[in-house]
Image (cartoon, rainbow, N blue to C red):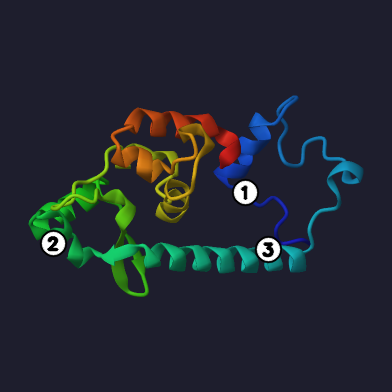
């Protein structure tokens, strides 16, 4: 018996199925092996999971390269340590654990001295399901909805609304 049969699909995959053209279907409903192919074997699922873990580890490493330790944020912002911790707890500053250290992606801060927090961090985080790694990859990539600018560049120039429209334009299919 395939141990992955009946496995819950992620929200991202359920939304893709719902937003696909045509009538909404559930993963097994109306499945035609000739069209969809046979169900993946345990070995295939294991390989997909291994590759997914590898890609996530590589993405986490890339995020760490454009991040600073949480302890450095008071120096960057001029805030007291407890103010920074409160901002992280509220979701105004995003942080993640990497190799035993709490890190903060630097795209969240202006280049001013002292740095200011970019606007709309909490809205962006909610749109990405609190996935700091995926959000960071999106924020630093050129975006056609922003005229080729990155969301980070648009936020830095005060174009918060354009960034929120760009995220809304992705729709469920992007996840």
Q: Is residue 4 left or right of residue 104?
A: right
Q: Residue 38 or 1: which is nearer the viewer?
A: 38
Q: What secondary structure is marked by label 3?
A: helix
Q: Is residue 148 left or right of residue 47?
A: left
The residue carrying mark 3 is 48
Mark 1 to mark 2 CA distance (whole Å): 44 Å
Instruction: Give the crowd class for mark 1: few <14, some 14-19, many >=20 residues within 10 Å.
Output: few
Instruction: Give the crowd class for mark 3: few <14, some 14-19, many >=20 residues within 10 Å.
Output: few
Mark 3 to mark 1 CA distance (whole Å): 15 Å
Q: Is residue 167 left or right of residue 124?
A: right
Q: Position of residue 135 (x, y in %)?
A: 43, 49
Total labels: the figure holds 3
Quarter location, residue 151: top left
Which residue is the extreme one toward the top? Answer: 23
Which residue is the extreme one toward the left? Answer: 80
Instruction: Give the crowd class for mark 2: few <14, some 14-19, many >=20 residues within 10 Å.
Output: few
User: In front: mark 3 or mark 1?
Assistant: 3
Residue at (62%, 39%) from the top-left corner?
A: 14
């Amino acid at each position: 018996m395939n141990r992955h049969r009946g496995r819950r699909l992620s929200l991202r995959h359920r939304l893709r199925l719902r937003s696909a053209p045509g009538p909404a279907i559930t993963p097994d409903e109306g499945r035609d092996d000739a069209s969809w192919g046979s169900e993946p074997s345990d070995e295939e699922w294991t390989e997909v999971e291994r590759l997914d873990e590898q890609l996530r580890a590589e993405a986490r490493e890339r995020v760490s390269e454009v991040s600073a330790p949480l302890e450095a944020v008071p120096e960057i912002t001029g805030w007291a340590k407890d103010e920074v911790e409160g901002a992280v707890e509220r979701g105004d500053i995003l942080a993640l654990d990497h190799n035993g250290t709490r890190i903060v992606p630097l795209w969240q801060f202006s280049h001013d001295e002292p740095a200011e927090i970019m606007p709309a961090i909490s809205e962006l985080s909610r749109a990405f399901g609190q996935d700091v790694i995926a959000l960071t990859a999106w924020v630093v990539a050129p975006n056609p909805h922003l005229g080729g600018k990155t969301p980070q560049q648009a936020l830095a120039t005060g174009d918060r609304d354009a960034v929120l429209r760009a995220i809304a334009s992705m729709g469920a299919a992007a996840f």
